[in-house]
Image (cartoon, rainbow, N blue to C red):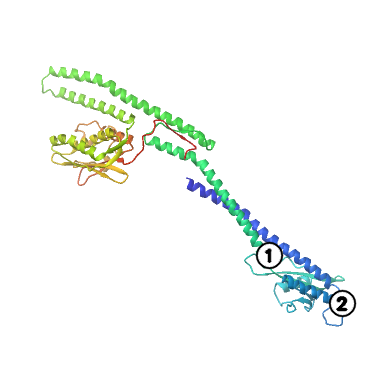
Amino acid sequence: MSTRLLPLLIVLMAAVLLALGVPLGVSVARAEQQKVVIDRIDDTARFASLAQFVTEDGSGGSRRTDTDERLETLQTELTSYYEVYGIKAGVFYRNHIPMANAPTTWFLPQAGEVRDSFDEALLSRRSHDPAQVWPWQDGTLVVASPVIRDGDVVAVVVTESPTDSMRSSTLRGWLVIGAGEVAAMLLAVGAALRLTGWVLRPVRVLDATTHDIATGRLKSRVAPSGGPPELRRLARSFNEMADHVEDVLEQQRAFVADASHQLRNPLAALLLRIELLALELPEDNEEIASVQTEGKRLARVLDDLLDLALAEHSQADLKVTDVGALAAERVAAWSPTADVKGVRLVGDCPPTTGWADPVALSSALDAVIDNAVKFTPHGESVRVEVASTGDAATVVVTDNGPGLTDEELTRVGDRFWRSGRHQNINGSGLGLSICRALLAAGNGSISFGHHEPHGLRVTVTVPRTGTVPKEPERVYGLTDR
């Protein structure tokens, strides 16, 4: 979830920073240009004041001495201005003839921004602010001011400034803004990480606790501390729900165990009376034989129910176990039974270690091998193979019996379930359920599949490594990772 929430927060914060940074960058660029434009306006106003009383036209006629001095002063100022700042400047009569200019080779062009500014100043107003020059543009800045004498425009002062310095200053301002944006983004990412962790840490704890409960550690709980208030309430509600579920399961197990235990004595007495009654009847009486068979079957069901309740409630004693040796032992134990039935029981059990409860694994293998021998016809074989698959050890039991259909494979292992084709074979339908409960207590598993050309393939899997079993009570804090 963090991989989805964190990018969303980062994108939103980046959008906010861009929304603030872009206008700020534009404002910096405009402020830099405005500063230059104001400076050029002051310069053109000063040059206009010098040129105001130089002469009335550019006809080249005779001038008075004081006019010549003013013209010389104006030319000197323009030349110095150009040499110091590199800014082209000139004062041009209405007929486009220069009064003074620097450099002296600079004249009014026939068209372009300089000519447009000159024409606009002839209308007795300063030219409009020039278009914005961005750092990536290589242009000039043109400012023109009219020279007014007795209310009439007699000449125009024009300056054409290079923009290298202005663009460099703008770029430096943008770099400062960019550095600030990067720093703010890093802080925002750090805040997003903290916020995401604060919000999602309770969710991760709830997920871990749910996984523990799903895998059989029903004592696991969430410590309701830290995180948003809504998730703290969720943690409390989750703990209450887990308590109720555990209570219901405990009551169910206790009922099954008590019922199985309490029914055994009356059933044993009933079977004894049936035996006594059978002594008074003919030996070949079918009804009494059927009653005895059903009574014994009921006794087996009660025993299996008690075993199942104990398997689901008991704590596994996990340790490093030689799965190969244990499987070979069970093959040897079941070989006489298989021989009596005319079934070949073959074992391929190389030494392989696993992390399991030896007693539980032995009981599970007994149930699987018993089931395989029971359903394998005379003359066929049952194979028990032990193998290692990296992080797990497996015991594969295959038989050549009738097998199960795809639909039946989805139900095998359910309590009391038996295939309709096998109802005439002794069994309670609880053997594989007990096997699954025993394996699950030790983090093991059992799976079923087809065996070609016919038969059933049962795979018992236990981990090869593990840890010391957890305490019965496991509480997760919302501050745990």
Say whether residue 170 is left or right of residue 123: left
Work out whether 30 lies above or below 232: below
Q: Is residue 341 above or below residue 278?
A: below
Q: Residue at x 63, y 57 (%)?
A: 176
The residue tagged with tag 1: helix, strand or loop? helix
The amino acid beneath tag 1 is Met
Q: Quick one: 257 or 71, which is closer to the camera?
A: 71
Residue found farthest to the bottom: 61
Query: x, y (%) of residue 22?
Result: 62, 57
Which of the pair 267/180 is nearer the observer?
Answer: 180
Q: CA distance from mark 1 to mark 2?
A: 36 Å
Tell me residue 126's x, y (percent): 77, 67
Does residue 73 appear in this view? Answer: yes
Residue labelled with disc 1: 166
For image coordinates 67% across by 59% down, the residue present is 28
Q: Amino acid at mark 2?
A: Thr
Residue name at image x 75 percent, y 64 percent: 38
Helix, strand or loop at mark 2: helix
Residue at 21% x, 33% y: name it: 423
Question: Residue 127 is drawn in which quadrant?
Answer: bottom right
Q: Which residue is tagged 2?
A: 67
| Nearest the eye: 148 or 14 | 14
Quadrant for residue 285, please give it: top left
> Where in the figure is residue 123, as x and y percent of width and height?
79, 70
Q: Quadrant of residue 244?
A: top left
Compared across the picture, whether 472 is left or right of 357 comes to right
**Left or right of 125: which side holds 463?**
left
From this viewpoint, is residue 446 visible?
no
The image shows residue 446 at horizontal and vertical percentages of 29, 39
Upstream in sequence: badge 1 or badge 2: 2
Neighbor class of circle 2 (other Cα within 10 Å; few <14, some 14-19, many 20+) is some
